[in-house]
Image (cartoon, rainbow, N blue to C red):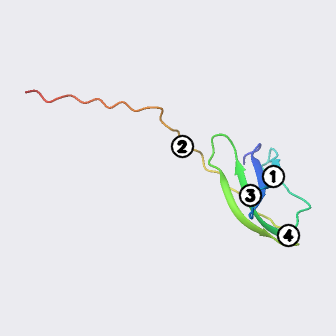
Amino acid sequence: VLGGITVQLLLQKDSSIVKSTVTDALGIFEFSQLMADSFIVTASSVGYQQYVNFIRINENEKDLGRIGLDKQGKDLTGVTVVAKAAPV
């Protein structure tokens, strides 16, 4: 369970942001008063890969269930290769 995750709801047709929120300490969030349409849901936090999902909301409530975020790998700033020449 991760709190403090930024969750955004974007329109699929033009990627404009409709709503944005941050999860509570239990990782719970809610968007209310939404029109029926197709959306993109994103969830992101420093150190984790961004979650992206395409959803359709009708007039009824939509429960996204659990959203899992994977830890982001560490990028190397540089690699040094050392080789020794064979004796002649």
The residue located at (74%, 67%) in the rendering is: 55
Marks 3/1: CA distance? Answer: 23 Å
Mark 1 nearby-residue class (10 Å; few <14, some 14–19, many ≥20): some
Q: Earlier in the sequence, mark 1 or mark 4?
A: 1
What amino acid is labelled 2 in the image?
Answer: Gly
What amino acid is labelled 3 in the image?
Answer: Ser
The residue located at (86%, 68%) in the rendering is: 61
The residue located at (82%, 48%) in the rendering is: 21
Q: Earlier in the sequence, mark 4 or mark 3?
A: 3
What amino acid is labelled 4 in the image?
Answer: Ala
What amino acid is labelled 1 in the image?
Answer: Ile
Q: Earlier in the sequence, mark 4 or mark 2?
A: 4
Asked whether 24 or 76 is in front, the reply is: 76
Residue 65 screen position, x and y as percent: 75, 62
Q: Which residue is mark 4?
A: 36
Marks 2/1: CA distance? Answer: 25 Å
Q: Which residue is mark 2?
A: 73
Q: Quadrant of the C terminus?
A: top left
Marks 4/2: CA distance? Answer: 37 Å
Q: Earlier in the sequence, mark 3 or mark 1?
A: 3
Under circle 1, the secondary element is loop
